[in-house]
Image (spheres, coloured by chain):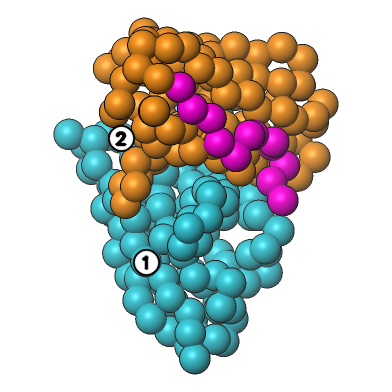
Amino acid sequence: QVQLVESGGGVVQPGWSLRLSCAASGFTFSSFGMHWVRQAPGKGLEWVAVIWHDGNKIYYGDPVKGRFTISRDNSKNTLYLEMNSLRVEDTAVYYCARDRYSSGNDAFSVWGQGTLVTVSS
Amino acid sequence: QSVLTQPRSASGTPGQRVTISCSGSSSNIGINTVSWYHQLPGTAPKLLIHSNNQRPSGVPDRFSGSKSGTSASLAISGLQSEDEADYYCATWDDSLNGMVFGGGTKLTVL
């Protein structure tokens, strides 16, 4: 079945780095745009970043521009999020989500279960 | 503050019809399609509506979406207790070059 499984979350101090992974299965990973979406405790959904199916287009939300890097390895069916200079306000559950299309500007049709990132001193 | 505006809460009794609004602008809802998600506590969001008014397979026809100008709406008819959840709208914003969400609406079934 179609599945997304995130990993790599944990507790880090402000200024540290962390790399999240999202393993995809049950569909042709290289045919779909992929997103990261986060949700701070008790808050709403916030879009983080998107990468087109072939990696040729990448966009970021303003709060993470210059600090986070989204990438993908289509040979490994895996999406990544490299997070640098982490701040307390980056504390959230991070979801990876598949777009409906090969681009990344339509809708989030499949979601992972999420991985918790806690930034605290 | 979210780019898309939703009411913070909505409520209804079992069997009723409720609607949730989502207001945007000419750079997002005005020119792109809207999707809707619901989220139960402690779980991942789930796609309810895409392309303004299309239901993925498996989503009951009690859920319907519409769009007019720079606003969209989600309607839930025949309200059931299991519909109690948070609901979010989303779309692409051509000015921001990114997806944007509404702040979410907490639906309570009385």
Direction bottom: furthest residue: A121
Q: Which residue is mark 1?
A: A116
Where B19 sits versus A91, above or below? above
Task: Identify the residue at horizontal 69%, vertical 37% (top origin).
Answer: B4
Tell me where the magenta segment starts and ends, as one range: B1-12
The three-letter amino acid code for the residue at tag 2 is Thr
Name the residue nearer the viewer: A106 or B44.
Answer: B44
Pick the quarter of the image with the N terminus of chain A.
top left
The chain drawn in cyan is A
Q: Residue at x 43, y 33 (%)?
A: B108
Q: Which mark is residue A28?
A: 2
Q: Return the residue found at the far left.
A: A1
Determine if residue A34 is in view: yes
| Quarter assignment of residue B15 | top left
Q: Is residue B1 left or right of residue A5?
A: right
Instruction: Determine if the magenta segment contains residue B60.
Output: no
Q: Nearer the viewer, residue B99 or A54?
A: B99
- Amino acid tagged 1: Leu
Shown in orange, the chain is B
Question: Mark 2: few, some, or many residues within 10 Å (few <14, many ≥20)?
Answer: few
When the figure is inspected, residue A89 is found, relative to residue A73, above or below; the finding is below
Chief SS of the magenta region: loop
The chain ID associated with circle 2 is A
Q: Position of residue A95 (x, y in %)?
A: 40, 53
